């Protein structure tokens, strides 16, 4: 299929917005992606025509909502090629998935002295839930260091992994550096010692093809809103053999088979992990978003975003005041910048007045900021709907900043 | 550049950012506090030498964006030599200015040097930056040693 960028942009009504009288240049896609019309329509139609609770009612609307919710689960399964549909658990997002996972995995498998292996480039959501779990179960958090390019130090990984390691929990693509980690290699190494691996795919699911069976990862998490779907919906994937052994994270409705005051029998997968009324519209919206992405094509997305990143990187390299933070060989469409002597929040405010939306701050990765000895970065992150003209607008605005602060 | 940006990044602010006044640490300090904005990592220590009721010396140290740094620098030039009551009064004047509506009239004579920070009102996300050193100064005076944060 041949994609026309103008046609693609028309799928995203918000891209036609103006900010302070200037065309919106939305380069904050790693924070959240914009939504195509089809996703917006799906949410609207659901609330207009189908809203009702799932798995409960015998009435018509409840059946429609249940069918659509479960169809969305199947869409997700197919997209990441999970073996079973009931290995797909709906959550509120990556953070919710990580918290549920860390809690439940620790309860099932971790003992004092056991080790959890993460990396220096994790988002806080793959650090803090483990710290909480460690306090409860006495396990210890170990960290794979990164080098000056923002790549994992694989030799150090080999030294850190040991019989004490009970789980490797690793980000696929760094949200603040753009590094694409060699997860296939890491999973293979961990599996040689029978250690399961969790992959944080929050920043990769929208850019790279993911086949959980081929990767053979044991768990994987991502958010709907970063793959053109709604906020408040996310996925926890896990191999059935583990999920069956792991206790539920929350108790309540929908996750039970029977309840008496003496005893509760938990429901089967995936419902065991889906207590309470789910984000039904969100799940259905996520299903539509995935269909949209498949229709655009991950090959097209990789090419388009790769061109934007290469172009932006070459422009950044031409400006002596700019240093790129994150220069890994394998990168996704994130460009984190340090502009000499200028605080990212000043940069962000000035860019904003030119209609250019970027993220400024530590990106919930404070250990990375400390590693590079900076308080924050200015991060542009690209989607296939961005254009080279928008990259030009970013750099024109950055030049303005540099001139102002000269 | 549009007018609002000019308002925010005036030459005075750019100058205080580049050459902050009273930047460093005091040898003899009677009052100090630490300010931190977790949103952006801005961090400033404010130290004062208060003799009787007079702030004889004030210095600040740390790092932050141009707005937070310039605001801190301007603050020290205002506060130095004033009484504690006067400093608290300026803290109030500053606070009233920064939380007023962006288009509210300002009395430049009454505000004095503080007036250059009026442009921050156009940028709600940056008010915490401008506030940081002032709240830290206030905390040092009232001898509250908890690290203050403006991310509230």
Image: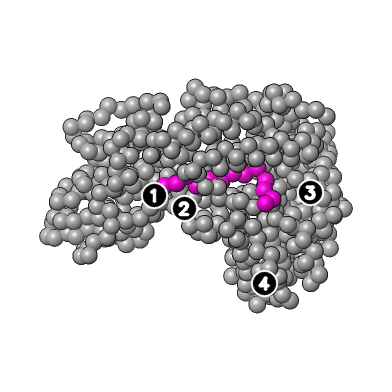
The answer to whether one can see residue A20 in this image is yes
**Secondary structure of the residue carrying numbered label 2:** loop
Tell me: A177 left or right of A265. Answer: left
Q: Distance between the residues labelled 1 and 4?
A: 36 Å
Q: Quadrant of residue A57?
A: top right
Check the residue under mark 4 and report the chain it is in. Answer: A
The answer to whether residue A375 is above or below residue A185 is above
Residue closest to the eye, A395 or A31 = A395
Image spot of residue A126 (x, y percent): 63, 58
Tell me: A110 left or right of B133. Answer: right
- Name the residue carrying label 3: A210
Q: Distance between the residues labelled 2 and 1?
A: 8 Å
- Numbered badge on residue A160: 4
Q: Nearer the viewer, mark 4 or mark 3?
A: 4
Q: Name the quarter where the N terminus of chain B is drawn.
A: top left
- Name the residue carrying label 1: B64
Q: In which quarter of the image is residue B128?
A: top left
User: What residue do we see at 25% from left, 46% from top?
Assistant: B75
The answer to whether residue A78 is above or below residue B116 is below
**Coloration of the structure image:** one colour
Q: How far apart are marks 1 and 3 (CA)?
A: 40 Å
For label 3, the crowd category at 10 Å Cα-Cα, with few meaning under 14, some 14 to 19 and many 20 or more, is some
- Numbered badge on residue A375: 2
Co-location on one chain, circles 2 and 3: yes
Residue ranking furthest to the left: B52
């Amino acid at each position: 299929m041949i994609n026309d960028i103008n046609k693609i942009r028309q799928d995203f009504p918000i891209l036609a917005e103006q900010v302070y009288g200037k065309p919106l240049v939305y380069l904050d896609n790693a924070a959240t992606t914009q939504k195509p019309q089809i996703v917006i329509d799906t949410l609207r139609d659901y609330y207009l025509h189908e809203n009702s609770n799932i798995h409960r009612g015998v009435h018509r609307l409840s059946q429609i909502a249940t069918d659509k919710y479960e169809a969305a689960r199947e869409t997700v399964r197919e997209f990441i090629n999970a073996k079973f549909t009931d290995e797909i658990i709906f959550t509120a997002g990556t953070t919710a998935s990580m918290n549920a996972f860390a809690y439940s995995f620790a309860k099932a498998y971790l003992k004092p002295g056991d080790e959890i292996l993460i990396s220096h480039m994790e988002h806080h959501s793959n650090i803090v839930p483990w710290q909480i779990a460690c306090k409860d179960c006495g396990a210890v958090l170990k960290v794979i260091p990164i080098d000056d390019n923002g790549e994992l130090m694989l030799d150090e990984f080999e030294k850190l992994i040991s019989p004490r390691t009970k789980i490797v929990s690793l980000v696929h693509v760094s949200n603040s550096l753009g590094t694409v980690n060699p997860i296939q290699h890491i999973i293979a190494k961990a599996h040689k010692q029978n250690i399961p691996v969790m992959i944080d795919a929050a920043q990769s699911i929208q850019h790279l093809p993911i086949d959980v069976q081929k990767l053979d990862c044991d768990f994987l998490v991502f958010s709907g809103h970063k793959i053109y779907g709604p906020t408040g919906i996310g996925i926890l994937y896990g191999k059935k053999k583990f999920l069956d052994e792991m206790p539920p994270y929350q108790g309540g409705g929908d996750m039970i088979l029977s309840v008496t005051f003496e005893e509760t029998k938990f429901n089967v997968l995936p419902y065991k992990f889906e207590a309470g009324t789910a984000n039904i519209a969100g799940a259905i919206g996520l299903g539509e978003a995935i269909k949209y992405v498949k229709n655009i094509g991950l090959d097209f997305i990789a090419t388009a975003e790769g061109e934007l990143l290469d172009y932006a990187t070459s422009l950044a390299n031409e400006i002596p005041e700019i240093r790129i933070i994150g220069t890994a060989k394998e990168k996704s469409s994130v460009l984190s910048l340090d502009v000499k002597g200028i605080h990212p929040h000043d940069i962000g405010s000035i860019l904003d007045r030119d209609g250019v939306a970027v993220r400024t701050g530590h990106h919930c990765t404070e250990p990375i900021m400390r590693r590079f000895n900076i308080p924050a970065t200015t991060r542009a992150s690209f989607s296939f709907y961005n254009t080279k003209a928008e990259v030009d607008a970013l750099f024109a605005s950055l030049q303005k900043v540099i001139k102002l602060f000269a | 550049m549009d007018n609002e940006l000019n308002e925010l990044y005036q030459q005075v602010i750019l100058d205080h950012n580049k050459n902050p006044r009273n930047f460093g640490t005091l040898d003899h300090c009677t009052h100090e506090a630490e300010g931190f904005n977790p949103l952006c990592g801005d961090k400033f220590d404010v130290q004062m030498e208060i003799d009787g009721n007079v702030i004889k010396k004030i210095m600040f140290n740390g790092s932050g964006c141009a707005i937070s740094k310039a605001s801190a620098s301007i603050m020290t030039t205002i506060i130095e030599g004033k009484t504690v009551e006067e400093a608290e009064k300026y803290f109030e004047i500053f606070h009233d200015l920064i939380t007023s509506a962006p288009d509210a009239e300002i009395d430049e004579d009454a505000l004095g040097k503080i007036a250059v920070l009026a442009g921050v009102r156009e940028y709600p996300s940056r008010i915490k930056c401008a506030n940081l050193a002032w709240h830290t100064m206030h905390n040092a005076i009232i001898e509250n040693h908890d690290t203050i944060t403006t991310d509230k």
